[in-house]
Image: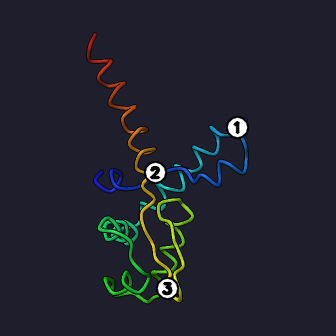
Amino acid sequence: LDICLNIMSVRRSFLGTYGKSTKRKEKRMGFQESFKALSDPTRREILQLLKTGRMSAGQIVEHFDMTGATISHHLSILKEAGLVDDEKAGKYIYYELNLSVVEEIMSWFAGFKKESSHENVS
């Protein structure tokens, strides 16, 4: 749950590509991508690292006993899911959390709480 409070969303570019008529379908697919990305403990740990701020790929790799290629693969999955953004600066690529994702997931989770609270009122 902590990770969901610090990440997640539907990729804006994905929704923009398909237009308004299929927005609901893409949103479900975006959540599916995001939850799939979050299912891996290494990717969740990467997201925890990025809570402190942007980091280069090399800085992220230093925290793991894995090859740079493996971490790069995990970062690609996180990026495709819309959970992280990257920016090239010189010869380095920096990664940071996509904080708009947090708002989308929090809103989605909050919907469960509202429904549950509403049912308990009766």
Residue 68 locus on image (x, y percent): 46, 88
Give the camera-side residue of 102 and 111: 102
Residue at 43% over, 38% down = 108
From what the image shows, is residue 76 above or below residue 70? above
Identify the residue under disc 3.
Answer: 92
N-terminal of the pair, mark 1 or mark 3, is 1
N-terminal of the pair, mark 2 or mark 1, is 1
Disc 1 residue type (three-letter): Lys
> Which picture quadrant has residue 88?
bottom right
Residue at 34% over, 26% down = 114
Identify the residue under disc 2.
Answer: 100
Disc 2 residue type (three-letter): Ser
Q: Please state if 72 lies on the left or on the right of 111 as rendered.
A: right
Residue 31 locus on image (x, y percent): 52, 49
Q: Are marks 2 and 1 in contact (CB under 8 Å)?
A: no
Disc 3 residue type (three-letter): Tyr
Question: Gap in Å between the C-alphas at discs 2 and 1?
Answer: 19 Å
SS of the residue under disc 3: strand
